[in-house]
Amino acid sequence: MPSASVGTGTAPRYSPTTVANNAGANCTNMNGAVTFTATHPTGPGHCAAEVVGRITNRSAMRLYCRVTYFSGGQAKHDTGAFDIAPGQTMGGEGSGLWSCSADEIKYSCVPSGATAASCAVNW
């Protein structure tokens, strides 16, 4: 596959979201413990307005992160959730952190565990 280039247009927005604590769940907001970047690759093999994200866990604990893609301020049906180990970087098309026709990625991270998926996110 040809190498991707970063488009010269407006960079996609990415932002952390707030987490609501649920009873019995450790829903500590860990967004400050990750580094998140996003790009708009262009060229052969890429869809229109493709957005690709990458996330690095800078904490000493395993995190559970969710992502949702937006277009024009409206949530798309593209979402994802995953565990990420301390020091691990993941992202790009191979890791499922991409979407077509999106202009924003919102993410939320909490400590990983049996109840992490029950933490409410205020998208």
Image (cartoon, rainbow, N blue to C red):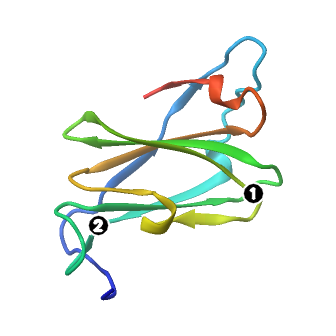
Q: Is residue 47 left or right of residue 12?
A: left
Residue at the location (25% across, 50% down)? 102
User: Hey, which residue is sitting farthest top in the picture?
Assistant: 23
Residue, disc 2: 40
- The quadrant holding residue 20 is top right
- SS for dot 2: loop
> Residue 85 shows which numbered tag?
1
**Mark 2: which amino acid?**
His
Where is residue 99 drawn, in percent x and y?
Answer: 32, 54
Q: Which comes sooner in the sequence, label 1 or label 2? A: 2
Q: Position of residue 85 (x, y in %)?
A: 75, 57
Residue 89 placed where, x, y %?
63, 66
Q: CA distance from mark 1 to mark 2?
A: 26 Å
Q: Residue furthest bottom?
A: 2
Mark 2, Cα crowd under 10 Å, few <14 / some 14-19 / many 20+, is many
Which mark identifies residue 30? none
Up/down of 12 relative to 114, above or below: below
SS for callout 1: loop
**Is 63 rendered above or below residue 85?**
above
Please state which amino acid type lies under the numbered disc 1: Ala
* Residue at image coords 66%, 34%: 29
Identity of the residue drawn at 45% across and 57% down: 97
Quarter-of-image position of residue 48: bottom left
Q: Is residue 7 left or right of residue 97?
A: left
Given residues 73 and 112, the one toward you in this image is 112
* Mark 1–mark 2 CB contact (< 8 Å): no
